[in-house]
């Protein structure tokens, strides 16, 4: 209570949890002290109405545990434990230090530290540390919005199972928070929840959901801090997204150079086709890949079909014929991050039946002739984030073309000999 390093909400939550866990035991004095702690925290947090209600419960408990002792001893015990005070703010048994002045300072120090950090994992750690120090929710989950897939993914979470806080019942409240561009507090199944929308202008960045364990509605000061955090988190996520994009581009360019070097060493066309699909799966982070050619009659021939472990697939079930057809007719790259919501695939049976999300299909052109079509998707791994930045993927396809031309040239030289 006298250490400002531990938030009062955290102490309140622990005191309530201990009382619940030890309810069946007759730990009278411990129970009294836990009630005293709770009352004084509520007073410090300016929750006088709740403090007064708990004080009445506290007085009833004092009478209950002293009813069978001599009157003088009972009166002394009641007096020591401030049974007779008339104004709740005069209740003062447990030493306690205010945290109010420290909260804004702690958050500002956190922002200063983050400003000098360029490691994404470190930034996530500092965000979690800051939210716990200044608000101390029981759980929270920070969602990041991706415009390319038009959906949200977890950016950072605390004390959450994988699916926690993903509640369909909250969806209307989340949309209301974005529409109002403001905090939306609510009570759900006995827990106090606050939804914080994160925007830059009118553009969605993500949202933060915080929940207590039923100990106390978030106070005016906590809500004020959340409004302050709202703007900072929006700017931080945008900064991290920009930094991650630059870092990813550098990584992909280095990976592409390594792949190009390895492919140029393969001069057997059959081996090269296998390696092209294998490297394409790694490069795009897809869950399966195919090299599709056409025979003289225009029928599709699946020359290579691999899963993410580079094992040969037993079937080609689930391939989006729509994506393949579009690429074959236009001879252009076809890609989508969210085929389920893409109008081009609304009537595609494979997309709907197999829950395909990210799809890529593109022709491999060699000197004006289509060598084949590279097809990739994330079937069975709907949440698997594929990398399909068009300019980088375009360069990757060029490297494949160069490798094929090199192998074909070598094959022609052998035939001439």
Image (spheres, grey):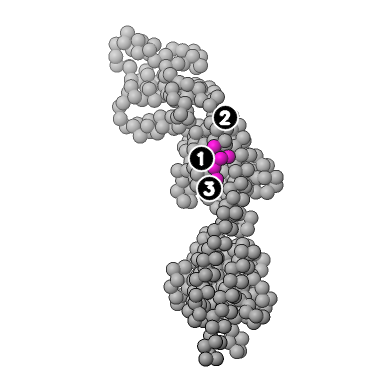
Residue 114 visible in the picture: yes
**Whole-Å distance between the Cαs marked 3 and 1?**
10 Å
| Lower position in the chain sequence, tag 2 or tag 1 | 2
Q: Which mark is residue 126?
A: 1
- Check the image and report above or below for 80 versus 280: above
Residue identified by numbered label 3: 120
Nearer the camera: disc 2 or disc 3: 3
Tell whether 309 sits left or right of 175.
left
Mark 2 highlights which residue?
104
The vertical placement of 162 against 296, above or below, is: above
Residue 45 percent location from the top left of the image: 52, 25
Separation of residues labelled 2 and 1 (CA atoms): 15 Å
Q: Position of residue 224 (x, y in %)?
A: 60, 31
Does residue 276 show up magenta in the picture? no
Q: Which residues are magenta?
A: 113-118
Q: Nearer the viewer, residue 61 or 331?
A: 331
């Amino acid at each position: 209570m006298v250490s400002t390093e531990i938030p009062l909400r955290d102490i309140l939550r622990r005191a309530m949890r201990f009382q619940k866990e030890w309810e069946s035991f007759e730990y009278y004095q411990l129970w009294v002290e836990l009630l005293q702690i709770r009352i004084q925290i509520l007073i410090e947090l300016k929750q006088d109405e709740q403090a007064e209600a708990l004080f009445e419960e506290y007085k009833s408990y004092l009478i209950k545990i002293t009813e069978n002792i001599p009157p003088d001893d009972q009166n002394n015990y009641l007096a020591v434990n401030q049974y007779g005070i008339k104004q709740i703010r005069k209740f003062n048994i447990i030493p306690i230090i205010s945290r109010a002045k420290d909260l804004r300072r702690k958050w500002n120090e956190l922002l200063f530290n983050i400003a000098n950090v360029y490691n994404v994992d470190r930034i996530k750690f500092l965000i979690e540390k800051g939210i716990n120090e200044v608000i101390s929710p029981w759980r929270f989950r920070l969602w990041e919005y991706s415009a390319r897939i038009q959906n949200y993914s977890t950016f950072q979470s605390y004390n959450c199972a994988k699916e926690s806080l993903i509640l369909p019942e909250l969806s209307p409240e989340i949309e209301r928070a974005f529409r109002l561009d403001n905090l939306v507090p609510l009570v759900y199944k006995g827990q106090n929840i606050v939804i914080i929308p994160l925007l830059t202008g009118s553009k969605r960045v993500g949202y933060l959901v915080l929940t207590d364990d039923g100990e106390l509605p978030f106070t005016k000061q906590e809500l004020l801090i959340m409004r302050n955090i709202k703007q900072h988190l929006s700017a931080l996520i945008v900064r991290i997204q920009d930094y991650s994009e630059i870092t990813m581009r550098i990584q992909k360019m280095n990976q592409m150079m390594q792949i190009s070097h390895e492919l140029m060493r393969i001069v057997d066309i059959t081996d090269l086709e296998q390696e092209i699909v294998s490297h394409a799966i790694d490069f795009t982070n897809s869950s399966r890949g195919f090299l599709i050619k056409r025979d003289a009659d225009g029928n599709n021939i699946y020359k290579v079909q691999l899963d993410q472990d580079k094992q040969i697939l037993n079937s080609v079930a689930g391939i989006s014929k729509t994506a393949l057809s579009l690429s074959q007719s236009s001879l252009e790259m076809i890609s989508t991050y969210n085929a389920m919501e893409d109008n081009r695939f609304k009537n595609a049976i494979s997309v709907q039946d197999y829950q395909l999300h990210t799809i890529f299909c593109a022709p491999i052109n060699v000197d004006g002739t289509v060598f084949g079509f590279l097809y990739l998707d994330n079937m069975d791994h709907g949440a698997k984030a594929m990398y399909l930045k068009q300019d980088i993927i375009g360069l990757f396809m060029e490297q494949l073309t160069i490798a094929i031309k090199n192998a074909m040239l070598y094959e022609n030289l052998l035939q001439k000999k």
